[in-house]
Image: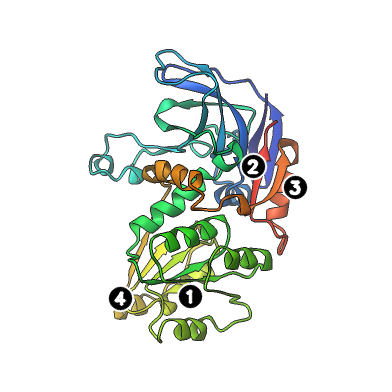
Amino acid sequence: MKAAVIRGIGQIKVADVPKPEPDAGEVLIRVAYCGICGSDLEAFHTGMYEPGLIIGHEFAGTITELGPDVTGWQVGDRVVVNDAIPCGECPPCREGRLDACQSLTMIGVTHDGAMAEYTRITTKGLHRLPDHVTLRQGALVEPLSVSLHGVRRSRLKAGDRALVMGAGPIGLLTLQCALLAGARMVAVTEVDASRAALASRLGAKVVLDPARDNVGVALADLTDGLGPDVIYVCTGVPGPFRDAVSLVRKGGQIFVLGMCVEPVDMDFMTVAMGDLCIEGSLAGRDAFPAAIDLIAQRRVDVDSLVSHEIALDEIVTKGFNVLDTPKSGAIKILVRMS
C-alpha cells in the first residue's frame, strides 16, 4: 500500500509499504480522508518525528478487517479514531487526567498513523460516525475535539469576552466552541486575509491584523478598557504568546492550544502583577463524542475549513508546500486516499 513516510527534516516520501495486519483487539481501517495537522508541519520542518514514521492522526475511514478477540464492531462500520491512547495506570490517568498520561501514545506521532491507504488501530480509540456525517467531515472530528476540550478546560463563562489568536483550523474551531459556550464576544487576530474572512463569517465580532491594527487599543474599546477575560493562543509562532500577557485583563486567563517549538520570552512580571492564569491542553480525548454530535447537529461548521482536497501523491507539492506559502489561502488540507 502507499503511505506518507517521514524520512528526515523537510523530507516526506510517498512509499510502498506492507499493508498492516490487525493484532488482538485491533481493527484494520481503510482510510478515506486524513488531514494535515500543524504538528505534522512542525515535524516536517524540525524532524521531531522519528524517520520511518507514517504520519497522520486526523482521519476517518471504514473497518475492513477485525483482529482476534474484537467484539462490538463489524466490517463496514464507518469510524473516526481518537488519536491519543492513555495507559490508564499512571498517576494522571488514575486522577482522570487521561490527556496528561505519562505514557500517552499518539497515532501518527509515537507510532504509524493514517496518512496511508490502510491503518491498524486498537478498538480503545474507535468511535462510530452517524449515518448523516460524511467521512470527509469525520476527518475534522479530532481537531474539533482539541478545541472543544480546550474551551471546556478554560475559565470561560457565559457572558465573558474572549480573544482567539490565530485563525487556522484550531483557532476557527475554538472560535465556534467559545461562542457555543456562551461568550458574548469573540475577537480574532489573524494576518492571512482568507482565514480572517472565514473567521468573520463564523461569528467573530472583529478580526484584527496584528501587522496593521493596534490590537491593544481595539480590544480595550471592545472590553470597556479591561481586556478579554480569556485569550486562546492557537498559533505556532512566538509573538502571540508574548503579546497575550499584555492583552488579557487582570485576573484573566491565557489558554494555550497552539504548538510553538521555539522558546518564548515571557514577561513574568506582568503575569504576577496581573494575577494571570496560564494553562494549556493536549488532545481532546474526553470531547470526542460531543465533537461528533456537534458536527451531526450542524452546530459547528467544519466544511468551510476545508480549503484544499488533494491526493496522497500530492502531499508535499500541494500539501506541505502550500501550507508553507504565505497568504496561500490554505486552511485545512485533507488528503483523499481513494
Q: Position of residue 273 (x, y in %)?
A: 30, 81
Tell me the CA gap for discs 1 and 3.
Answer: 32 Å
Q: Are marks 1 and 2 in contact (CB under 8 Å)?
A: no
Residue 191 appears in view: yes
Note whether 51 is above or below 214 in the view shown.
Answer: above
| Nearer the observer, 215 or 9 | 215
Query: Under tag 1, what secondary structure?
Result: helix
In this figure, which residue is indicated by the disc labeled 1? 243
In this figure, which residue is indicated by the disc labeled 3? 318
Tell me the CA gap for discs 3 and 4.
Answer: 44 Å
Tell me the CA gap for discs 4 and 2.
Answer: 44 Å
Earlier along the polypeptide chain: callout 4 or callout 2?
A: 2
In this figure, which residue is indicated by the disc labeled 2? 8
Tell me the CA gap for discs 1 and 4.
Answer: 16 Å
Query: Under tag 2, what secondary structure?
Result: strand
**Labelled disc at residue 251:** 4
Residue 261 appears in view: no
Way the structure is coloured: rainbow
Earlier along the polypeptide chain: callout 3 or callout 2?
A: 2
Foreground mark, 1 or 2, reads: 1
Note whether 158 is above or below 226 in the view shown.
Answer: above
